[in-house]
Amino acid sequence: MKALNISAVSYLNTYPFVYGIQQSGYLRDYQLYLEVPSMCAERLKSGEADIALVPTGALSDFKNYHIISDYCIGAVREVVTVLLLSDKPLEKIRKVYLDFDSRTSSKLVQVLAQSFWKITPLFERLKPGQAEDHSEREAIVAIGDKTFDLKGRYPYSYDLAEEWIRFTKLPFVFAVWVSLKPIPEDVLGCLNKALRFGVENIEGTLDFFSAKLPKNADCRQYLSENISFNFDKAKKEGLNLFLSFL
């Protein structure tokens, strides 16, 4: 097989996967692209990537896809980095701006608004980079490392994973490893071993990425407690329920 093209997310929550891919030695012939979640799906769709860490909100874009790993980006409690930030309480929000970087959170907040919170705000998607600027907005859905800085600017913060769990009593899955074509079993085996290596070596991950870690975050706690990497039965149930809402 030719070199494996892999597209993964460039956020802190994916650093263990990246560390495993780059440092475990299980995968040898590959090209790794790191980008925002929405672009991972686009690279897979265009054929530039053989496998990608795809936001679950983008899975409906594909007619046929294969979830190929035992690992995911999931949450069984508050996730910290997927937030609805607002200057007023839920029932008074009239408009929500959506982070360009994520398809999943944009869909999740709309599911929660309609089915759990019972509110009907307008939704508007921001352009790339706008979620990080200092514009005052009534409410914004923001994801990723930028949330560590943004949270303090708003009096109200709603963790979307925590809200989903309150609503469904199930975990939430933000992204899964996907291919659109068959990947040799030995390659998949090596990928799983590489991902497991990273997940089981959080300290090594933090050391490896020390220069890139968000300075105002407890990265060790975040990766050990807020992100849940195993794609287990409960997460599969949560994913299937989320997809049914879409």
Image (tube, rainbow, N blue to C red):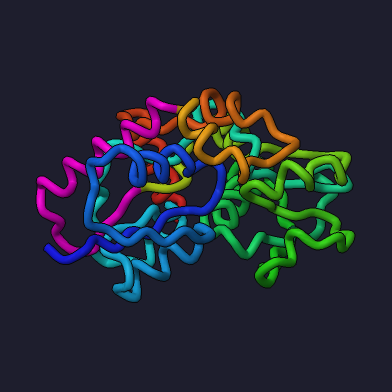
Chief secondary structure of the magenta portion: helix
The answer to whether one can see residue 18 in this image is yes
Image location of residue 233, percent across then percent down: 30, 29
Q: Quadrant of residue 79?
A: top right
Image location of residue 188, percent across then percent down: 18, 46
Q: Is residue 136 left or right of residue 140?
A: right
Task: Decide which of 96, 91 is in the foreground and name it.
Answer: 96
Which residue is depicted at the point 48% across and 66% down? 39
Task: Decide which of 240, 117 is in the foreground and name it.
Answer: 240
Say whether residue 94 is magenta.
no
Q: How many marks?
A: 0
Q: Is residue 104 left or right of residue 187?
A: right
Which residue is depicted at the point 73% across and 41% down? 148
Task: Decide which of 226, 62 is in the foreground and name it.
Answer: 226
Q: Is residue 162 above or below residue 65?
A: above
Which residue is depicted at the point 40% across and 41% down? 17
Image location of residue 46, percent across then percent down: 34, 76
Q: Quadrant of the N terminus?
A: bottom left
Residue interval drawn in magenta? 177-201
Q: Quadrant of the C terminus?
A: bottom left
Return the residue found at the far bottom. 46
Q: Is residue 139 left or right of residue 80?
A: right
Which residue is depicted at the point 82% across and 48% down? 86
Q: Is residue 153 above or below residue 196?
A: below
Image location of residue 167, percent across then percent down: 57, 33
Q: Is residue 93 above or below residue 133?
A: above
The answer to whether one can see residue 169 in this image is no
Q: Is residue 143 left or right of residue 57?
A: right
